[in-house]
Amino acid sequence: MQRSTGLLLVTVLGLTATACGSGEPAPSSAGGAKAVTITVACQPAKSAPKERQAWDDDVAAFMKANPGVTVKSTDQQPCFDPKTFGPKLAGGQMETVFVVPVTNYDDVIGKGQALDVTQYTGAVKNWNDLRPDVRELVTKDGKVYGVPNVHYGVGLVYNRALFTKAGLDPSSPPKTWAEVREAAKKIAGLGPGFVGYGEYSGGNTGGWHFTQAIYGRGGAILTPDNKKAAFNSPEGKAVLQNLHDMRWVDNSMGNKLLVGWESLMMAMGSGKVGMMLGAPDVVTDVVNKFKGNVADYGITAFPEAKASLSGGEAFMINPKATPEEAKAGMAWIDFRFNTVGKGRFDFARGKSIGNPVGVPDNAVYGDSPTGQAIQADRVKNASLPVENYQPYVDAAATIPPKAEPVHAQELYAILDVAMSGVLSRKDASADQLLADAETKANSMLAAKG
């Protein structure tokens, strides 16, 4: 559950003026004269050897540029695991530099589990080009506790090759849920193993996608004061009833319950799933991690969207870090994740190792000079046609964003049950599932105060 007012496809070419950050600048050697070792999260897994090598190359280049700093990587993927995150933080096992999803910002900051890095923001040279609304999310009482890394909105990811095979026009993807349903039936009709529309049912991902779907229909998860559940509503019922009918009336969703985040990504990568809800980075993950064909995937607007779930993640620094470790950690974040043409924004390298360059998968810099430079470089080095994503880009500028609810992970776990219910039982009652979930959610919210 990681990921805005929209992603704009900017094609402005040329040089950009780099904004200066505020706070204490990073020294030329992040560790100064004193040797320092930091641990950093998110090294690509061994199953993605080219991406892992690129990461390791960046680590080596960073250490060469910062004598005295040693970087040790951990390769937990995905970077954030809701099952291990809390215990890892509480047990003092978290890396010096770690990832936090937007749903957990307030909790982590409120518990003192992230370092106040206000004095170190100068280490991120393009700090002032980061979107102000995104920076505000990691700021509390005027103090900064992280560096925004990802910001996104949700759309409909689809397999263009399957659309063609099923007699559908891949350049005219569905705009309504009725059109999604019809397209899903045609794709499922291609034969055994083909799934028209994929959806999650557990691992907190079912509730996450329920939230995406109810937001799109104009509904809400919580009341405005965040004290009561609001999903037991006509919009909530429409979400579950639509899934129930696609599963049991149309037989267009397959018969396998997809629980964790990776399960639907793997299915999409197999080339037999037609559509799913997701942000643009789904394409990157499907291709890089799950061997999908780089040319097959497109992204379009969320069907009938009245709002779109937005989300993201930030890098934070362990509160136990020494000043030297904090400086080195912030310098690493700048080097690997915030430098035009380098690290994750080295699109030329990405293209050379087969990454699907061209996906508008991050709006953290928006339309700032840095954002324009990043997008221009992305288009210049695109390895797949950017027009595949133009419907998403166009819509993202007009669909209002809506943030994930407070206590999101707990709510998602509760809503998993409702999602699993309609996808596993033909006789499941959407009304009863929502009522049960509402009772559990209200009890949880009351306990949280």
Image: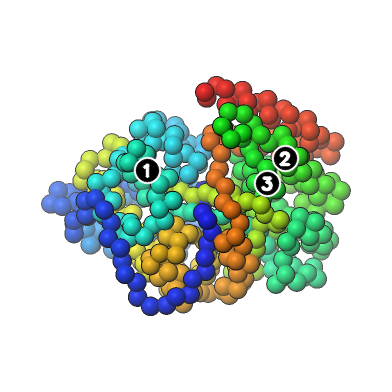
Horizontal side of 180 relative to 305 (left or right) equals right
* Residue at 58% from the left image edge and 35% from the top image edge: 224
Q: Which mark is residue 236?
A: 2
Residue 135 in view: yes
Label located before the other in sequence (3 or 1):
1
CB-based contact (under 8 Å), mark 3 and mark 1: no
Count of labels in the image: 3
Q: In x, y percent, where is residue 367? A: 44, 65
Name the residue nearer the viewer: 426 or 315. 315
Horizontal side of 35 relative to 292 (left or right) equals left
Gap in angstroms between the C-alphas marked 3 and 2: 10 Å
For label 1, the residue is: 139
Pair 3/2: label in front: 3
The crowd level at tag 3 (other Cα within 10 Å; few <14, some 14-19, many 20+) is some
Q: Which mark is residue 22?
A: none
Q: Which mark is residue 218?
A: 3
Horizontal side of 206 relative to 107 (left or right) equals right
Name the residue nearer the viewer: 287 or 117. 117
Q: In x, y percent, where is residue 276? A: 67, 55
Kindly state the secondary structure of the residue where label 3 is placed: loop
Kindly state the secondary structure of the residue where label 1 is placed: strand
Q: Which amino acid does the dot numbered 1 rest on?
A: Thr
The crowd level at tag 2 (other Cα within 10 Å; few <14, some 14-19, many 20+) is many
